[in-house]
Image (cartoon, grey):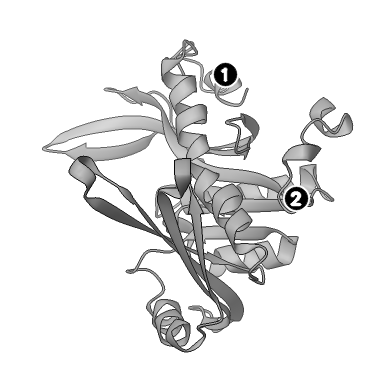
Amino acid sequence: MPLIFSKVLYPHRLDDCYFVVAVDGTGHLYFRDRHCPHCLTRTQQGKTLYYHHVLEAKRVTRSGLAVSLMTEFIENSDPHATKQDCELAAFYRLSRRLKQRFPRLPLLLTLDGLFAGGPTFQLCQQYGYALMVVLKDSDLPSANAEFESLAKLQTENQLRFRTGKDGIIRQDYRWVDEIAYLDSQNREHLLSVLECRETKPGKKGKETTTTFKWITNLKLTRANVIPLAENGGRIRWKIENQGFNTQKNGGYELEHAYSQNPNSVKIFGSS
């Protein structure tokens, strides 16, 4: 909260408005024997592993900052549940808590492809969140198909940009607005799809091309596609590299069980 009140992170807002928050899950604790009644379980080759995962919301910036805003523990808290807890269910709880804790903070959630679906779109609409979700070719077939069809016709929604030393990296952007997506509960969402094909010199001078694609609830323009891609979609990886990797391998021992008490083990995880 002091960071918010002192406006330290204001210069790092996207489009002078959004605080970019990456949401992702990671492993926390693993046990050979049941640790507590809330353990998740996985059986492989006849052996059962007991574990605890967490879902983190971290404020991330292009400069490499990754600050935890909120933690939602993924655990079997309901003894009568027919399914184990999971990242998606944890996200629904986390998004509600974020809105309660920061009711007026303009957030852009950057998420991986697991969250590409109607419930996520509906929650972000309800809470007023902007979002960018990784869109794989195998996800949301109708949205992908409409994007490919319309992108060929809307040649004005294309942009080439060069970056890197001497402009050796070429980025080709395509985007389509107002793609209608009907979810499993027959709710219609108007979304946009943004694609970036990045080509750079590889080994022995051979070029390599990587495709990035996101689905978003923001309107796309020539003025905002590059900032959204670079400072919204692609910095999601900061939660892995500068976030979880540092917490696990930078001396903080995120995966170390400092206590056997089910409540005490959460103190470090939520710090």
As displayed, is residue 218 above or below residue 168?
below
Residue placed furthest toward the left: 45
Q: Which residue is mark 1?
A: 268
Expressed as whole percent of the image width and height from the top left, the position of residue 131 reads: 62, 59
Front-most of residues 191 and 28: 191
Query: Where residue 81 sits: x, y (%)?
Result: 45, 52
Residue 183 coordinates in the image, percent (x, y): 51, 78
- Left or right? Give the position of 16 relative to 140: right
State the residue in front, 113 or 85: 113
Q: Report the Cα–Cα distance between label 1 and label 2.
A: 23 Å
Residues packed near mark 1 inside 10 Å, few (<14), some (14 to 19) or many (20 plus): some
Residue plotted at (52% across, 19% down): 265
Mark 1 in CB contact with mark 2 (< 8 angstroms) = no
Rendered image quadrant of residue 124: bottom right
Counting from the top left corner in percent of width and height, residue 117 is at 49, 67
Give the residue number, with chain letter if any, for mark 2: 99
Furthest toward the right, the residue is 5
Which amino acid type is shown beneath numbered disc 2? Lys
The secondary element bearing badge 2 is classed as: helix
* Picture mark count: 2
Residue at 84% across, 50% down: 104
**Is residue 67 among what the camera can see?**
yes
